[in-house]
Amino acid sequence: MFDSVRRKKAGNDILQGLIAAWPVCLGYVPIGLAFGVIAQQAGLTPLHIGIMSVFVFAGSAQFIAVSMMAGGAGIASIILTTFAVNFRHFLMSSSLALYLGGARKKLISLFAYGVTDESFAVNLSRFRQGNWNINRALVVNHTTNFFWVAGTIVGGFVGQFIPEGKFGIDYALVAMFIGLLAMQLNGKKYVLTALLAGFLAVFLSMLLPGNLYIVASSVLAASAGVLVLRKIRQVRHNV
Amino acid sequence: MFELEYLLLILGMGVVTYIPRWIPLVALVGRKLPRWMVEWLDLVPVAILASLLLPLLLVSEDSGRIELFRPELLAAVPTIIFALKIKSLSGTVVLGMLVFWLLGNLL
């Protein structure tokens, strides 16, 4: 009897995870195809592409790495750039850590593999709503990972047949960021922090090299938000 | 850049991608964090997503300057309105791509 209860619970976790994951998969297919196309043009075979997607699983860093390879960059500079581009996930994992108390160490280490901009935003908003756990979050991470790997490999095969700029493929990532951000804007403090971070990022992106602006503007805006919240509490306390 | 060299590259990229995702999770999970840090980590997600998004909409990759009336920004207007009203991620992705594609055909 307990077995059947447990099986039902596992089945429900998988179903809930899939429901949360599928919009991201929908976005990953065109982006993955686009990556496969570019990687194939840079001289990578579908096997090379698949290996990279499995071991790195970081869309924007993969795009940058392939364009650097095509430009003849060395291994060390590509790895260093990957580190810089992906360092924002350090902040994302820190935020997710708030909700993973009680989860097993092994599962947490597995979960870390799949922390991307998209899985992070989907999992975080579900954790905040409650009714979310590491099993469901792992389903989200690994389902989206599967679609990413598959999409990039297929892109490597069919790349040459897809004309450039068709079907809004170039916009899939932007639209996904819009949707993910909209999901998080539940309250004035989030809206104001997002506006501050966004405009800081625009200006810093023109001043700082590479992708450094992402981490810089995020840290500045979140810190400003914390200071403002504290000030508001002090004022209320004094009145 | 192939075979052994490529595998070395992939290994290096994989390690520097995984470690920053992993360290905060094993270091922070289950810890009692100070209030300011919880508040800070609560604001970080919207800050990152906005930092990723706005430069893509406003800054031209070619000139490196702010440009209004870019198709990226124009297509974002209906996409943002839809995303805020309907709160559907899949719908937002499909609508955004559709609008951007139509704009590209019109402009």
Image (tube, rainbow, N blue to C red):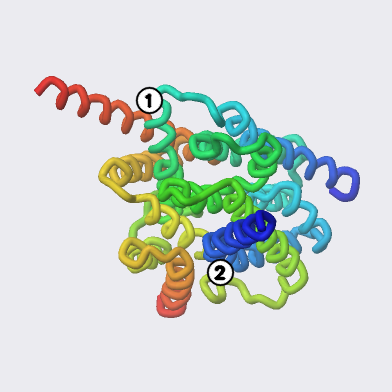
In the image, residue A20 sits, relative to residue A72, either above or below, namely below
Residue B97 visible in the picture: yes
Q: Position of residue A41 (x, y in %)?
A: 74, 63
In-image side of B92 versus A54 (left or right): left
Q: Position of residue A225 (x, y in %)?
A: 32, 33
Q: Quadrant of residue A2?
A: bottom right
In-image side of A36 versus B24 (left or right): right
Q: Write down the residue under mark 1.
A: B35
At 80% from the left edge and 59% from the top edge, which residue is drawn? A44
Tell me how far mark 2 sits from mark 1, CA to CA. Answer: 42 Å
In the image, residue A52 sits, relative to residue A158, either above or below, namely above
- Asked if badges 2 and 1 are on one and the same chain, I answer no
Q: Write down the residue under mark 2.
A: A169
Q: Secondary structure at mark 2?
A: helix
Q: Residue furthest right?
A: B4
Q: Residues within 10 Å of mark 2 (few under 14, many from 20)?
A: many
Which chain is indicated by disc 1? B
Residue A209 visible in the picture: no
Which quarter of the figure is the C terminus of chain B placed in? bottom left
At 50% from the left edge and 53% from the top edge, which residue is drawn? A122
Q: Quadrant of residue B7?
A: top right
At 60% from the left edge and 40% from the top edge, which residue is drawn? A86
